Amino acid sequence: MPIYQTVRFQVRPESLTKCQTAIREFVRYVRDNEGNTLLYIALQEKDDPTRFLHYFVFQDEEARERHQDSDAVTRFTSILYPETLAPVEFTEYKVVAST
């Protein structure tokens, strides 16, 4: 059963370019290496570019664990987390309706 999650975070304004680069590299890695990550999209707030929302869908728990345990996640979070202004907020969802 697919797993639907988001993560919200805000970065320091002075580290915006560094974080955007890390996000792009990370999403590229996911696209090229994680076939069981069905969707991964990184969104940046239009009115406050320091705020981000990532939305992702894993095929199943095994896919999520493989993602979480990857060297790419370790590398990404080592760049991103020191630049965040508040704790990173993960939320898991269930589908109510879809097209």
Image (cartoon, grey):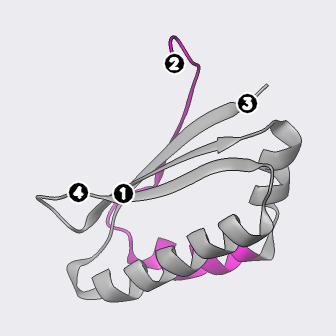
Element type where label 4 sits in the image = loop
The residue wearing badge 4 is: 45
Along the viewing direction, whichever of 6 and 9 lies nearer the viewer = 6
Q: Which residue is mark 1?
A: 43
User: Measured from the top left, where is residue 85 in percent x and y?
Assistant: 32, 66
Give the farthest residue toward the top.
96
Question: Which is more N-terminal, label 2 or label 4?
Answer: 4
Of circles 2 and 3, which is in front? Answer: 2
Residue 96 percent location from the top left of the image: 52, 11
Give the extent of the magenta segment: 72-99
Q: Nearer the viewer, mark 1 or mark 2?
A: 2
| Residue at image location 57% in from the left, 54% down from the top | 40
26 vs 76, nearest the viewer: 26
Q: Is residue 94 magenta?
A: yes
Residue 86 image position (x, y, % from top left): 35, 59
Q: Is residue 88 left or right of residue 43?
A: right
The amino acid beneath tag 3 is: Pro
Question: Residue 9 occupies which quadrant of the picture?
Answer: bottom left
Residue 98: assigned label: 2
Q: Secondary structure at mark 1?
A: strand
Query: Residues at badges 1 and 4 in contact (C-beta under 8 Å)?
Result: yes
How far apart marks 3 and 4 lie (CA) works out to 26 Å
Residue 2's disc is: 3
- Of circles 4 and 2, the one toward us is 2
Mark sitting earlier along the chain (1/2): 1
Question: What residue do we see at 27% from left, 76% from top?
Answer: 12
Q: CA distance from mark 3 to mark 1?
A: 21 Å
Q: Amino acid at mark 2?
A: Ser
Does residue 58 sit above or below 30 in this rendering?
A: above
The alpha-carbon separation of the residues under discs 1 and 2 comes to: 20 Å
Label 4 Cα crowd, 10 Å radius (few <14 / some 14-19 / many 20+): few
Q: Secondary structure at mark 3?
A: loop
